[in-house]
Each structure stands twice: as structure tokens, then as C-alpha cells.
Amino acid sequence: YMRKTKEVGGRADAHAEGKGPEQFTGKNLSGVVNAIVFLAQLHYKVVQILEAARPLVSDLPNFEAFEALATDTALELSDSKEREFKDWQRTTLAEIKDKKRPLKLDPAGASMSFEKGEDLKVHFDE
């Protein structure tokens, strides 16, 4: 399970760098932001599994190997999440400071509206 989690985390990391499939692109969030959220969720899940396993199976012979792998995976996911967040933050700040094509919000436009079937739609650029 931990090896698969590590593999999936690596794919999310690769996608955030623009090398992976488009599966992390969401409706209202960019692929980079979805990858950051996904990495954070994976990290939390690995930490939860490790904390649950300690009192239950810590006496088994291979637990130390599992614990080392889980700890390594959690650290790797955390590092990936932090790296992707800092890259996203740096890119966003550069776009805000760009004089030729600044990042802006349109305060005059509708921020939300109801569509057919009374679904609420949030309007903003990704």
C-alpha cells in the first residue's frame, strides 16, 4: 500500500510540474492546486495509517520495515506538497506583479448565479 501511495504521489508531483496526465485538473481549481490538495490528503492518510498500525501490529516482525517505509513516504509527500506550494506561490506572485499582463479579478461581474435545476455556479477564472 505504501509503495502504491508513493507512486501515486509521484504522479501528482509530476503533473504539477506539467509532465503528467490531466486527471488532477478540477472544475474550479487549477491542476497545480488540485495536486497540492491531493498530496496533502495522501500525506494525512499515510500518517493516519501509521498511527493506527502502531498499537495494533507493532509486535509483528516486519513492522519496523513498514514503519520506515511509511515514515519515508509521509516525508516525501510532505516535501512534494511544500515544494509544489512554494512553486505555485512564486508563480502567482509573479503574475500579480507582472505589469504587462497582471492577474486581476473582475469585481463588476457576477460572482455566483443559479443555473437550471437551481444549481449554484461560482464564476471566476482558473
Image (spheres, grey):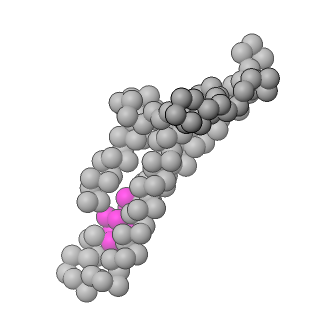
Viewer-nearest residue: 52 or 72:
52
Image coordinates of residue 124 in percent, x first then y, are: 65, 28
**Residue 107: percent from the left, percent from the top?**
79, 27
Residue 104 in the image: x percent, y percent? Answer: 74, 24
Residue 12 x %, y %: 40, 41
Q: Residue furthest front?
A: 117
Q: Which residue is located at x 65 percent, y 31 percent?
A: 113
Magenta portion: prevailing SS class? helix
> Is residue 89 magenta-colored?
no
Total number of numbered discs in the rendering: 0
Query: Which residue is the extreme one toward the left?
Result: 61
Viewer can see residue 92: no
The image quadrant of residue 68 is bottom left
Residue drawn at (33%, 52%) of the image: 6
Asked whether, in this view, residue 58 is left or right of residue 91, the answer is left
Quadrant occupied by the C terminus: top right
Q: Nearer the viewer, residue 75 or 12?
A: 12
In the image, residue 61 above or below residue 65: below
Q: Quadrant of residue 121?
A: top right
Relative to the observer, which residue lies in front, 74 or 104?
104
Classify 103 as above or below 3: above
Q: Is residue 70 magenta?
A: yes
Residue 101 seen in render: yes
Which residue lies at the image location 31% right of the left edge and 64% below the top edge? 69
What residue sits 27% from the left and 82% below the top? 57
Give the magenta-colored segment's residue range: 67-73
* The N terminus - image quarter: bottom left
In the picture, measured across the screen, residue 37 lies left or right of residue 12, that is: right
